[in-house]
Image (cartoon, rainbow, N blue to C red):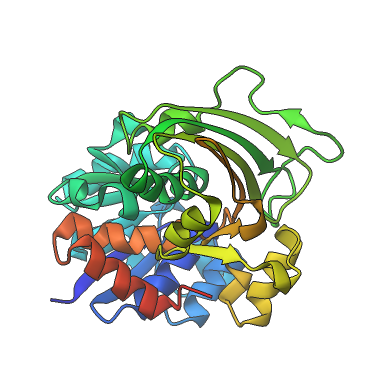
Amino acid sequence: MTIQVAVNGYGTIGKRVADAVTAQPDMELLGVAKTSPNHQAALAVENGYPLYAAVPERIELFEAAGIDLAGEVEELVAAADVVVDACPAGIGAENRSLYEAHDTPALYQGGEDADLVDVSFNARGNYAAATGADHVRVVSCNTTGLARLLAPLEETYGVEKARVTLVRRGGDPAQSGRGPINDILPNPVSLPSHHGPDVNTVFPDLDIDTLGLKVPATLMHTHSVNVTLESSPDAADVADVLDRQDRTYLVPPDRDIDGAGALKEYAMDRGRPRGDVWENCIWTESITVEDRDLYLFQAIHQESDVVPENVDAIRALLGTADAGESIRRTNEAMGVGF
C-alpha cells in the first residue's frame, strides 16, 4: 500500500514534512497547499511538488507571480488518504470541516488545542492510540522532546516527579517579527507553562511541572531537567538507557559541542538538510544522579524534531505499521541518528 499524503501548509514544518514524506518508500506526496505565492511556494514547484491554492480567491496572485498551480486545496484533500495540516496555529481548527467534508483523516501540529483532536501523539509515548482516529495532533517540539525523554525513564525506573525549566528561543530564524530582541522574559510569568499539561495529553498520569523563559535566540530550545525517579540508578546506567533510544543523541564530551550553535553546525557539517536536528541532544556530561534525583540538559531543534513524528503519525493513524517498524522506516529513510 502506498499512502497518498497531502500537506496543507508549506512553511517551516510543512516543507520539512513534505520532504520527509517524499523520502518514505511507502508514501507518495500528492501535493502541498499554500495561501500566498511567496518564495516557499516557488520552492515547492522547483522541488516538483504539485502546488494547490489554499485560498481560491488568491489564485490570480499565483498567476501574476508566474507560479503554476495544480488546482485548489479541496481537490488535494479529496484525493488524499491523509492530510497533514501544517498551517499556523489556529488555522488547523478552521480547516477541520474541510477534511471532514471529504472524510479524509487529518494530522495537526502542536499549536492546535488538544480538544480539537481525538489523540495527541508521540511515537515513543502512545503510538497505538492514534490507530483509527480521524483527527490526530502531533504535539509541539518541546512536548515531543520531553515525551521522548520521559517515556524510557518511566519504563525503566519509574518517574515520581518531573520538573523542567525550558529556555525557549524567541523565534525561528525567519520570524523577524518575533522577540524578545534584548531581553529575557518569563514565558509565561504564571506557573506552570503550557508544556507540562501538554505532556499530560500523552502521559495523563505523569506528575510534571514546567517553567518557561524566552530568550533572544533563534537556534534551539534548551531544557534543564530534574526528574525524581522511583529507583536510584547510577548516571552511567541512565546514559546507557537514553543512548539506546531511537531519537536521542548523547553529545560526547570529546566533540567540543558546548551549545546550540555548535549542534547546528555539527548537523550542517554532516549534510543535514537545512541543518536540521531531529534528535533530542542530551549532554552526556550533564547526566547526574543524586539519590533518586536525575539532572540533565537537552537541546531541542524547534523547526525539525516533530518531522519524523508526523511521518510516524501517518502510519499510526492508518494502521499500516506498528511503532517499532514505523520508527525504523522513518529513521532509515530520513537518515535520523548521528
Visible residue check, residue 275? yes
Query: Residue 114: where, in percent of width, then height?
Result: 34, 33
Q: Residue furthest right?
A: 182
User: Looking at the rendering, in which quadrant would you find the C terminus?
Assistant: bottom right
295 relative position to 6: left or right: right
> What residue do we see at 53% from left, 57% from top?
236
Residue 19 versus residue 88: which sits nearer the camera?
19
Q: Quadrant of residue 53?
A: bottom left
Visible residue check, residue 59? no
Query: Residue 323: where, in percent of width, then height?
Result: 23, 61
> What residue do we see at 48% from left, 81% from top?
47
94 relative position to 128: left or right: right
User: Looking at the rendering, in which quadrant would you find the N terminus?
Assistant: bottom left
Residue 24 versus residue 58: which sits nearer the camera?
24
> What residue do we see at 48% from left, 40% from top?
89
Residue 238 versus residue 321: which sits nearer the camera?
238
225 relative position to 50: left or right: right
Query: Residue 276: where, in percent of width, then height?
Result: 58, 68
Residue 262 versus residue 237: which sits nearer the camera?
237
Query: Residue 239: where, in percent of width, then height?
Result: 51, 58
Q: Is 234 rendered above or below residue 23?
A: above
> What residue do we see at 41% from left, 36% from top?
199
